[in-house]
Amino acid sequence: MTSEMNMVYFDDVDVLHVTFASEAEHQSFELAPNVTVELNAQGELIGIEILQASAFIRDFVLESFQAKLLQLPQLQPA
């Protein structure tokens, strides 16, 4: 498998498509709601398609940020 990552965002339909290899897609399946993974004939990951990408990225960033905040020690007043 050749590794050549490429990302394309289709803003008119809010879809992000990420490819990791320029190989033919053999099969795909929904990994999570609005997230589809694409596999080659050997079962290796070659692409990911994210529908409603702007909401997905926003939610992912917010959840990550909130998780980091919860891990911070409680701030003591000066």
Image: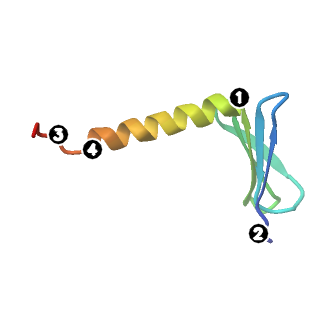
* Residue 18 image position (x, y, % from top left): 76, 50
Placement of the N terminus among the 4 image quadrants: bottom right
- Sequence-earlier tag: 2 or 4: 2
The crowd level at tag 4 (other Cα within 10 Å; few <14, some 14-19, many 20+) is few
Instruction: Tell me what residue is drawn at x 71 percent, y 28 percent.
Output: 52
Judged by depth in the image, the label closer to the viewer, 4 or 3, is 3
Dot 1: element: loop
Judged by depth in the image, the label closer to the viewer, 2 or 1, is 1
User: How far separated are the C-alphas under marks 2 and 1?
Assistant: 26 Å
Dot 2: element: loop
Q: Which residue is mark 1?
A: 52
The crowd level at tag 3 (other Cα within 10 Å; few <14, some 14-19, many 20+) is few
Judged by depth in the image, the label closer to the viewer, 2 or 3, is 3
Please tell me how many numbered marks the rendered image carries: 4
Q: Which residue is mark 4?
A: 71
- Sequence-earlier tag: 3 or 1: 1
Q: Amino acid at mark 4?
A: Gln
Q: Which residue is mark 2?
A: 3
